[in-house]
C-alpha cells in the first residue's frame, strides 16, 4: 500500500452549506482509572458483537498507531471506528474521530495524487455528512481538483507510480472518498472521475478468469510453488472493501452502479470458493499450503464485504452466511483478553510469514467494519 491517485491544480470548488447539526465540542481528556477488560466473545448476539468491537477499539485508542495521522493505515482504522460509532451508545469513538480531524486541520497527506493520502478524507466526509461543517471538507475539495488528471500508464515503477491507481489497494483508499465527495456536493465530476480511473485499473489488474486482482503489474508473471498465479489476500480484501464502500453510496438507479455490482458479485463468489475450513483466507489466495498461518486483515476485509452484501440483499444469505459466521469466529479468536487484535500481516505487497502477535490499525479497521455488519446480522 503505498501508491497513487489523481487530481490537482487550481480551481477551488464551492457548494451550498447547510448547517443541520453542530459538531459537539471535543471533550478534553482526563486521566481515568484502568478499566476492567471487556469480555471477548464470538457469540452470535448483538451485545456480544458490540462489546467485542468496543474492546478492540479501546485497545487501539489506548495504543495509538505511530503512523502519521493522515496515513492510509490510519485512514482504514478510522473507517472502522466510524462504523463502530454508528452502533455504540458511547460517544468516545466519534469524539476520537472529531479530535483527529481537528488535530489534522482536516488536511490530507502531502502527496497530491497519491491514493494513500486520500484515504483519511473518507472519515472527514462522513463527519461532514452529519455536521455540515464546511471546514471538515474544505482541504479535500481543494485537493480533489480533477481538471488536470495524470495520464501516465499503470506501470508500477518509478516516480509516476503513485500518480494513478496502479496497485489494487488504491481502490479502497481513494474511490470511496471521491464517491463521498460527490454525495456531499452533488458534483457529478467526482463520480465520473472515480469511475473512469477505477475502470482503467480494473482493465489492467483484474484477472477476469480468476475474478481476482493482481496487487500490481510486478505480479503478472510470478507463480506460486503450486504453479498458481500470485493473488494476495489483503490486496483483494482492499478491493472488496472498496467495492462495498462505493456501492453503499451509489443509488440503485445510478448509471455507474452496474459495473461495480457485477464485479463485486463475481469477486464474492470467488472469495467464497477459496475460504479455508478454519474461516480464514490464506495470505496467498490460490496456494494455501505455502503459508498456512492465520491472517486477520485480509480475512477481516472479506468478512466485512460479504456480510455487507448479505445485509444489502446483494448476496444470498443461505449461501454466504455460513462463511461469514466462520470468518467472524476466526477473527474473534485472534483478539486477546485485553482487546488487542493479533495476526495482522505488517505493511506489504504480497504474501509472507510474520510473527503471530503483530497488529496494525488497518487490521483493526477491517475488524470493526466487519463487526458493524455482523451486528446487523446477529440475533
Image: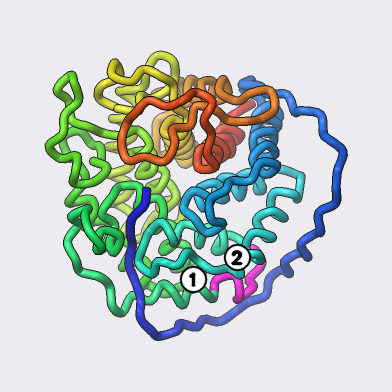
67 lies left or right of 115: right
Looking at the image, which residue is at 50% across and 62% down? 121
Residue 294 in the image, given as x and y percentages of width and height: 44, 21
Residue 200 in the image, given as x and y percentages of width and height: 21, 57
Residue 330 in view of the camera: yes
Residue 151 in the image, given as x and y percentages of width and height: 20, 69
Q: Residues within 10 Å of mark 2 (few under 14, many from 20)?
A: some
- Give whichever of 353, 323 is nearer the camera: 353
Q: Is residue 84 magenta?
A: no
- Give whichever of 1, 260 is nearer the camera: 1
Which stretch did the figure color magenta? 129-137
Residue 255 in view of the camera: no
- Give whichever of 253, 7 is nearer the camera: 7
Looking at the image, which residue is at 16% across and 34% down? 222
The residue labelled by disc 1 is 140
Q: Main secondary structure of the magenta part?
A: helix
The residue labelled by disc 2 is 104
- Residue 234 sits in quarter: top left
Q: Is residue 135 magenta?
A: yes
Amino acid at each position: 500500500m503505498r501508491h497513487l491517485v489523481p487530481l490537482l491544480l487550481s480551481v477551488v470548488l464551492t457548494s451550498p452549506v447547510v448547517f443541520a447539526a453542530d459538531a459537539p465540542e471535543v471533550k478534553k481528556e482526563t486521566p481515568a482509572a484502568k478499566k476492567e477488560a471487556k469480555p471477548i466473545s464470538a457469540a452470535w448476539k448483538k451485545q456480544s458483537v458490540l462489546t467485542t468491537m468496543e474492546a478492540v477499539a479501546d485497545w487501539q485508542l489506548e495504543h495509538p498507531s505511530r503512523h502519521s495521522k493522515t496515513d492510509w493505515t490510519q485512514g482504514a482504522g478510522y473507517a472502522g471506528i466510524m462504523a463502530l460509532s454508528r452502533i455504540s451508545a458511547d460517544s468516545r469513538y466519534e469524539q476520537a474521530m472529531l479530535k483527529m480531524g481537528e488535530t489534522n486541520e482536516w488536511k490530507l497527506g502531502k502527496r497530491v495524487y497519491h491514493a494513500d493520502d486520500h484515504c483519511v478524507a473518507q472519515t472527514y466526509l462522513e463527519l461532514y455528512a452529519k455536521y455540515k461543517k464546511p471546514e471538515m471538507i474544505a482541504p479535500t475539495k481543494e485537493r480533489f481538483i480533477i481538471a488536470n488528471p495524470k495520464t501516465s500508464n499503470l506501470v508500477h515503477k518509478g516516480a509516476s507510480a503513485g500518480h494513478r491507481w496502479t496497485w489494487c489497494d488504491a481502490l479502497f483508499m481513494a474511490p470511496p472518498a471521491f464517491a463521498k465527495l460527490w454525495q456531499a456536493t452533488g458534483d457529478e465530476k467526482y463520480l465520473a472521475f472515480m469511475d473512469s480511473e477505477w475502470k482503467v485499473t480494473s482493465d489492467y489488474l483484474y484477472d477476469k478468469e480468476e475474478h481476482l486482482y493482481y496487487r500490481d503489474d510486478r505480479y503478472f508473471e510470478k507463480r506460486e510453488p503450486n504453479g498458481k498465479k500470485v493473488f494476495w489476500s489483503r490486496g483483494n480484501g482492499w478491493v472488496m472493501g472498496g467495492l462495498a464502500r462505493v456501492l453503499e453510496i451509489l443509488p440503485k438507479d445510478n448509471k455507474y452502479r452496474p459495473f461495480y455490482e457485477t464485479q463485486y458479485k463475481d469477486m464474492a463468489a470467488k472469495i467464497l470458493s477459496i475460504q479455508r475450513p478454519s474461516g480464514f483466507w490464506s495470505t496467498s489466495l490460490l496456494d494455501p499450503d505455502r503459508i498456512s498461518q492465520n491472517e486477520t486483515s485480509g480475512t477481516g476485509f472479506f468478512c466485512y464485504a460479504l456480510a455487507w452484501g448479505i445485509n444489502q440483499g446483494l448476496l444470498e444469505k443461505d449461501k454466504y452466511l455460513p462463511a461469514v459466521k466462520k470468518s467472524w469466529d476466526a477473527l474473534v479468536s485472534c483478539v486477546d483478553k485485553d482487546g488487542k487484535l493479533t495476526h495482522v500481516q505488517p505493511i506489504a505487497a504480497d504474501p509472507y510469514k510474520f510473527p503471530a502477535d503483530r497488529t496494525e490499525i488497518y487490521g483493526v479497521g477491517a475488524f470493526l467494519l466487519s463487526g458493524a455488519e455482523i451486528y446487523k446480522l446477529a440475533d
